[in-house]
Amino acid sequence: MAEDQTAVAATEAELSDRIADLVEYLVLSIVDDVDAVSLEVIDGTDASVIEITVAEPDVAKVIGRHGRTIKAIRTLARALAARLGTSVEVEVLG
């Protein structure tokens, strides 16, 4: 029984890592300072949270006008998560 739970937890982590790869690809194509980009994946019981950290001047680029860019990134991440049978939230940190 414990092995099954460990296998499920590993699978959840692999799924959230695939989603994080997509988010990282999108963010890296937007920002100027690619070296300052870092992602942290926090696997929760209900959903995974992907926290994006970028350089201060790039925060506005990732968020976009009226939040359109981050909304699009979140939409793509949620669509992939739904396809993989999980859920995800994307947050931007300065």
Image: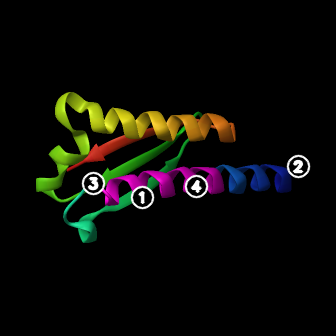
**Which residue occupies the foreground of this view, 47 or 77?**
77
Task: Give amino acid for label 4.
Answer: Arg
Is residue 12 rendered magenta in the image?
no
Range of residues picked out in magenta: 13-29
Nearer to us: label 1 or label 2: 1
Report the residue that reaches farthest toward the left.
57
Q: Are marks 3 and 2 in contact (CB under 8 Å)?
A: no
> In the image, 5: left or right of 23?
right
> What secondary structure predominates along the stretch shown in magenta?
helix
Nearer to us: label 2 or label 4: 4
Question: Mark number for residue 25?
Answer: 1
Q: Is residue 33 above or below residue 2?
A: below
Residue under label 4: 18
Label 1 – label 2 distance at C-alpha:
37 Å
Residue under label 3: 30
Could you say which quadrant of the image residue 53 lies in? bottom left
Nearest to N terminus: mark 1 or mark 2: 2
Question: Mark number for residue 1?
Answer: 2
Element under disc 4: helix
Element under disc 3: loop
Report the residue that reaches farthest toward the right.
1
